[in-house]
Amino acid sequence: MKAIQAISCFVVRRSRRLVGLIVVAISHLCHGHEGPPFPVVIDQSFGEQAISVWADPDIGEATFYVSLNDADGRRPRIPPRLRLWVQPKSGRLLPVLCEAQVLPSRDSLQFVFQTTFDQRDYWVVRIFQELPSAPDARPIEWSFEVESTPPGYDAWDLLIYLFPFAFFGIMWIVTFLRRAQRFQT
């Protein structure tokens, strides 16, 4: 118990300095997007359907998740063929065309695309939809830009994202124990 008291006194007295030191120590880690995919397009009109696109554009392996719904908000009756086309905005590389893998889902039609981004850059991404019932028709196209981001830290991701929650949890416990001790005396 005395060890907890000593730690709590140290933390409370030096909490401002400690927080400042921690922020400075990990500030070099703060850059770009880290973590789960983020929304790029949400429920936008795409032909007769609504499209949502989530991106995890890490350098190396970039992943795009696409969800399609009918105008009614249900899964399309005729599954379309989707392709993803990526190229650096600068045009330094030729475009790459990716085929989709269909993900199992009850409510919507979901696809996943995986491609490779070689360096940090802005990338033009286009999604093409072809209906199997009309192979001669011109495909519907949706276009947007993403910035590729450095890949995550793998096993360190959990520690990095857990740190603020653990820190404030420990601070709460220390404060609780100090107040409980004050009421006992």
Image: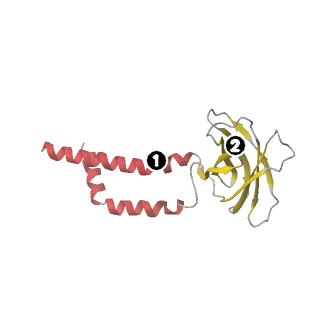
Quadrant showing the C terminus: top left
* Label 2 or label 1, whichever comes before in sequence order: 2
Find disc 2 in the rendering and name its residue.
Answer: 112
Q: Which mark is residue 162?
A: 1
Amino acid marked by disc 2: Val
Q: Nearer the viewer, residue 53 or 37?
A: 53
At x 69% / y 63%, what residue is drawn?
122
Disc 2 secondary structure class: strand
Q: Nearer the viewer, residue 160 or 112?
A: 112
Image coordinates of residue 26 in percent, x first then y, are 48, 60
At x 15% / y 45%, what residue is drawn?
183
Q: Nearer the viewer, residue 149 or 50?
A: 50
Quadrant showing the N terminus: top left
Image coordinates of residue 24 in percent, x first then y, are 45, 64
At x 59% / y 47%, what residue is drawn?
154
* Residue 101 occupies quadrant: top right
